[in-house]
Amino acid sequence: MLCCCWVPSQSLLSITAASSSSSHSPLSSFPSTRKLSCMDSAGTDSDGRQYQTAGEMWSEQTGDPNKKTQWYHCGVSYWEGVNATVDGVLGGYANVNEPDISCSEDFLKILLAERFPGDVRNQPLVALDCGSGIGRVTKNLLIRYFNEVDLLEPVSHFLEAARETSAPGYSDMHKAVNFYCVPLQDFTPDTGRYDVIWVQWCIGHLTDDDFISFFNRAKVGLKPGGLFVLKENIARSGFVLDNEDRSVTRSDSYFKELFSRCGLHVYKSKDQKGFPEELFAVKIYALTTEAPKTVHRTRSKTHANRPRTIK
């Protein structure tokens, strides 16, 4: 599994004419009254091939152990051939680095203020950067807000680059601590270590089953009140398979069904702004293990005390 901080290869990153300009919706064959499951959703690949369902695609790509092994091997192999630079890990779009970090920082500030206010916090903040790549997100964002950051990345030359740039730290109180060269689908965090587990531009390499398995394992790594932050490309509907780097871009509804299967709840979400128009939309989700509190609405006193007409 590849989990570097990446934007997918250009064939997936760019919205193809087949998926963006066609007047025919891939979901139009389903009755409008039917509630669709992500496994029912039609999709396409980077060569324009149509799949009737996600299940059909996954069966073809990873339907037996040998195919699944090859799926992950191809993903890692692709990124092993990419330069350990910002332009390399961002698929030739180094210019998205600044707006990406800016949007993420605005989102993170809100989460920290609401979930981990400094006036009541009695312990250091710790984050895990999943798919850390060359440490772009850690260096430019996480290490400034967390006392300790661990990096998880299976591509060794990316992780070595991250070690060189992140190990010096931001200050004595803000530093990178652990560098794990492990695939995302094989990683289990230490129990109760993290306030935030940040997962950016890497979850598309996981099959649906491994997506669910990863988050279920990773839950044990969260401290009480901790949360996941997932930032990913978003397909307009269904999914888009990249045949080159073996990754899948899922729609918002596809993600939300997987979140439900993981027992996760969307605490907040935000759309990325400022990216080139030819790129996929990008969304950032904050996910919690606890269900949102139900707000009980009561009738206002003004309405409750309004005189009724006697018939």
Image (tube, helix red, strand yellow):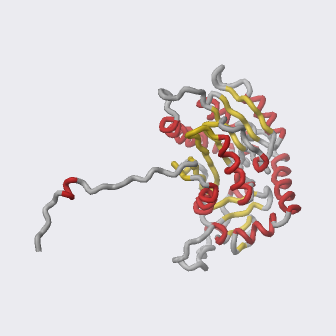
Work out whether residue 173 or residue 276 is closer to the camera in this orientation and state it.
Answer: 173
Seen at 19% across and 54% down, the residue is 302
Give how far across and how far down residue 107 sits, in percent: 53, 42
Seen at 50% across and 28% down, the residue is 118
Is residue 166 among what the camera can see?
Answer: yes
- Residue at the far right: name it: 66
Give how far across and how far down residue 162 sits, in percent: 76, 34
Work out whether residue 52 or residue 17 is closer to the camera in this orientation and state it.
Answer: 52
Seen at 85% across and 65% down, the residue is 64
Quadrant of the image occupied by residue 48: bottom right
| Residue 66 vertical position relative to residue 130 in the rendered view, above or below | below
Give how far across and how far down residue 102 sits, in percent: 56, 39
- Residue at the far left: name it: 310
Is residue 11 among what the camera can see?
Answer: no
Q: In this image, 283 relative to 159: left or right?
A: left
| Residue 204 vertical position relative to residue 121 in the rendered view, above or below | below
Quadrant of image for the C terminus: bottom left
